Image (tube, rainbow, N blue to C red):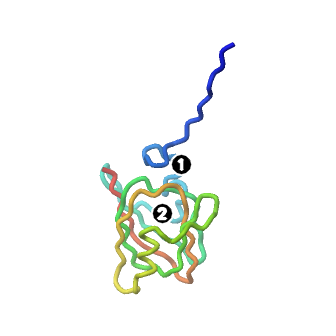
Amino acid sequence: MATESIVQTQPDQMDPSQWDPELDAVIAAPANHKVLFENDKLRVLEVMLEPDEEEPTHHHRWPSVFVFDQVKGPIHDMAPDGTMLPPNRDVIQAVQAWDGTGCLVVHMAPQPAGRVLNASDQAVHGIRIEMKS
């Protein structure tokens, strides 16, 4: 009697083109991500996160430049299961080091599914320019 192997395929977490489209930031966290402009090369988002607010789980499949005009720590990266991640991502370190004057500009790689908790008493606000190609 022959046996068949059943192989479950998981989306490749290292390949953003394989990420669940339903977890795109605009679809999964629309209260926090508003499309200001979009074409085949760019998508520009206004990003807002109120004090003590935690975003729904979502991803950002394209590299981007994030221009913060309002952000005060602490903000925390959270895994989809709600586990707080270590503050080792570029943007978290940049926010921690920022003196609050002018704008904070951070280049960001694609981000797999996760969420951000704004544990501060001030809203987070910025413009995220995602580069599709």
Asked if labels 1 and 2 touch by Cβ distance under 8 angstroms, the answer is no
Q: For mark 1, does the 10 Å Cα neighbourhood hold few (<14), some (14 to 19), or many (20 or more) residues?
A: few
Instruction: Say whether disc 2 or disc 1 marks the residue closer to the N-terminus.
Output: 1
- Which residue position is annotated with label 2? 33
**Relative to 73, 106 lies left or right:** left
Q: CA distance from mark 2 to mark 1?
A: 14 Å
**Quadrant of the rendered image containing residue 99:** bottom left
- Assign a secondary structure to mark 1: helix
Label 2 is placed on what type of residue?
A: His
Q: Residue at 39% across / 59% down in the picture?
A: 109
Whole-percent x and y of residue 94? 41, 76
- Assign a secondary structure to mark 2: strand
Reply above or below: 92 against 45: below
Question: 92 or 88: which is nearer to us?
Answer: 88
Whole-percent x and y of residue 125? 45, 74
Q: Residue at 40% across / 82% down in the picture?
A: 98
**Quadrant of the rendered image containing residue 36:** bottom left
Q: Which mark is residue 22?
A: 1
Number of numbered discs on residues: 2
Reply above or below: 87 against 34: below
Q: Residue furthest front?
A: 1
Question: 58 or 84: which is nearer to us?
Answer: 84
Q: Residue at 43% across / 46% down in the picture?
A: 15
Q: For mark 2, does the 10 Å Cα neighbourhood hold few (<14), some (14 to 19), or many (20 or more) residues?
A: many
The N terminus - image quarter: top right
Question: 106 or 131: which is nearer to us?
Answer: 106
Question: 15 or 47: which is nearer to us?
Answer: 15
Q: Residue at 43% across / 48% down in the picture?
A: 16
Whole-percent x and y of residue 111? 46, 58
Q: Which mark is residue 101?
A: none
Label 1 is placed on what type of residue?
A: Glu
Whole-percent x and y of residue 63? 36, 57
